[in-house]
Amino acid sequence: MWTTRNRARYYRDDLRYPSDLTDAEWALVEPLIPPAKHGGRERVVDVREVVNGIMYVLSTGCQWRYIPKDLPPKSTLHDYLVRWHDDGTLTAIHHALYMQCREMMQREASPTACVIDSQSVKSAEKGGRTVDPNGYDAGKKIKGKKRHILVDTVGLVLHAIVHPADIQDRDGGVLLLATLFGQFPFLRKLFADGGYQGPQFERAIAQACPQISIEIVKRSDPAAGFKVLPRRWVVERTLAWLNRCRRLCKDFENLTRNALAFVHLASIRLMLRRLCNA
């Protein structure tokens, strides 16, 4: 019988799906996943198969009920995704891989400059007993959620939040920086576009992160067509990298926490590929 146990044994080198973790990638992730809790039943599910199943949903964007039968059940995958997000496992994996990427590029572990931007994402049809509220972004004419990300100068994600699209960039940016909780104490410079300019944003950042100075990178008025702006293109490129995961092409999640979990997973996937393909 083709069960989870012998499937994990046969597919170490030959991956079933392009989204599966390679042996090198799994070697980086496995030590960061917490063991089963004491006192309960013995864990019988293959954790690597759970990660492969979640990555399959992230990469293909398929609905939970369309997960292939050779992966763990949808309920198992969804429960582990929620559990790892709520107990901080995804955050811990993301932070550990980020430090390794910085060291591989021979940079200091904690960056000193960062770039901020947001992306409004259209919501898909949703149903269920619990659906977190959406919003309407009048500037982009999009009804859905807004992803706010903070990246370093090489494009790696430092921090991210998800909120309704009707929250302005200035207010969302303050919320993003206020929830850093001292993770990167050496940040001194913040690059942003014109949507974040104004004394209101400056005062709020001065209260949340007094050590950070803001530089607004504006587009030149005489410029025609597409122009690469210093620093701003870095975060735009990161958003394009994340959007390669089809689960992020629209807002499919009923709960905001699940949407944020998939953003973290997309960034983890990006850093794993960078570390193992260098």
Image (cartoon, rainbow, N blue to C red):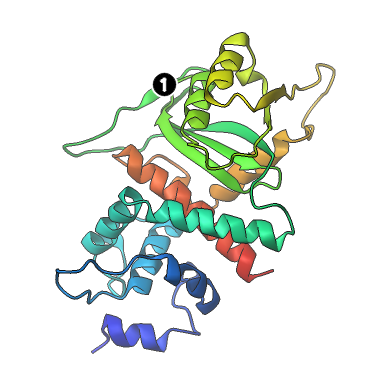
The N terminus sits in image quarter: bottom left
Q: Quadrant of residue 224?
A: top right
Q: In the shown orientation, is residue 158 left or right of residue 222?
A: left
Furthest residue toward top: 199
Q: What residue is drawn where x is 22% and y is 77%?
A: 44
Q: In the shown orientation, is residue 265 left or right of residue 127?
A: right
Furthest residue toward right: 222
The C terminus sits in image quarter: bottom right
Q: What residue is drawn where x is 63% and y is 63%?
A: 274
Residue 31 vertical placement versus 62 (above, below): below
For the residue pair 222 and 195, the one nearer the viewer reads as 195
Residue 54 vertical placement versus 223 (above, below): below
Residue 247 percent across, percent down from the top left: 43, 50
Dot 1: few (<14), some (14–19), or many (≥20) neighbours within 10 Å? some
Q: Quadrant of residue 222?
A: top right
Look at label 1 and name its amino acid.
Answer: Tyr
Q: What residue is drawn where x is 22% and y is 38%?
A: 127
What is the tally of numbered marks visible in this picture? 1
Q: In the shown orientation, is residue 68 left or right of residue 141?
A: left
Q: What residue is drawn where x is 20% and y is 36%?
A: 130
Q: In the shown orientation, is residue 149 left or right of residue 6?
A: right
Residue 134 percent across, percent down from the top left: 35, 27
Residue 255 percent across, percent down from the top left: 30, 39
For the residue pair 104 and 258, the one nearer the viewer reads as 104
Secondary structure at badge 1 equals strand
- The residue tagged 1 is 136
Residue 219 percent across, percent down from the top left: 76, 22
Residue 115 vertical placement versus 2 (above, below): above
